Image (spheres, helix red, strand yellow):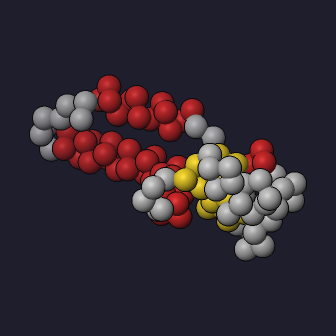
Amino acid sequence: MTAEELTEIQERADAATPGPWYVRHLDDTHAMNLVAVSTSPDTGLGERHPGFDHQAMVAATLVQEPRYVDVSDELWDENAHFIAHAREDVPRLLAEIHRLRRLLQAHGAPTQ
């Protein structure tokens, strides 16, 4: 991976909504079993609209009614957890790559 590619990934991460992000399980007569990624934690109450802050929603992995978001492999929760954790995982992975490259450089090893 080139330094330019790492910079592009870092720029995308820096431009995204700040974290942390959380998986939310919501419900209402329109979205029905909404699985979302949010900037606020899940309360466990399965709130219905307008009982949750729509402005805290980053992404949805399931909106069943109407079928707006409903991936065929039914991995809604898994996808939501992946997206939510990516907000913190990607910057941590980038920091680790930079740390390891600095170590390699300090020991005279070539880096890209």
- Count of labels shown? 0
- In the picture, measured across the screen, residue 81 lies left or right of residue 55, that is left
The outermost residue toward the bottom is 44
Residue at 46% x, 46% y: name it: 91
Image spot of residue 26 (x, y percent)? 72, 63
- In the depicted structure, whether residue 9 falls above or below residue 55: above
Image spot of residue 67 (x, y percent)? 62, 50
- In the depicted structure, whether residue 59 falls above or below residue 42: above
- In the depicted structure, whether residue 106 falls above or below residue 47: above
Q: Which quadrant: the N terminus? A: top left
Residue at 40% x, 28% y: name it: 8
Image spot of residue 39 (x, y percent)? 69, 52
The outermost residue toward the front is 66
Q: Which quadrant: the C terminus? A: top left
Of 98 and 42, the residue lying toward us: 42
- In the picture, measured across the screen, residue 63 lies left or right of residue 75, that is right
Of 9 and 34, the residue lying toward us: 34
Which quadrant of the structure image shows residue 43? Answer: bottom right
The outermost residue toward the right is 50
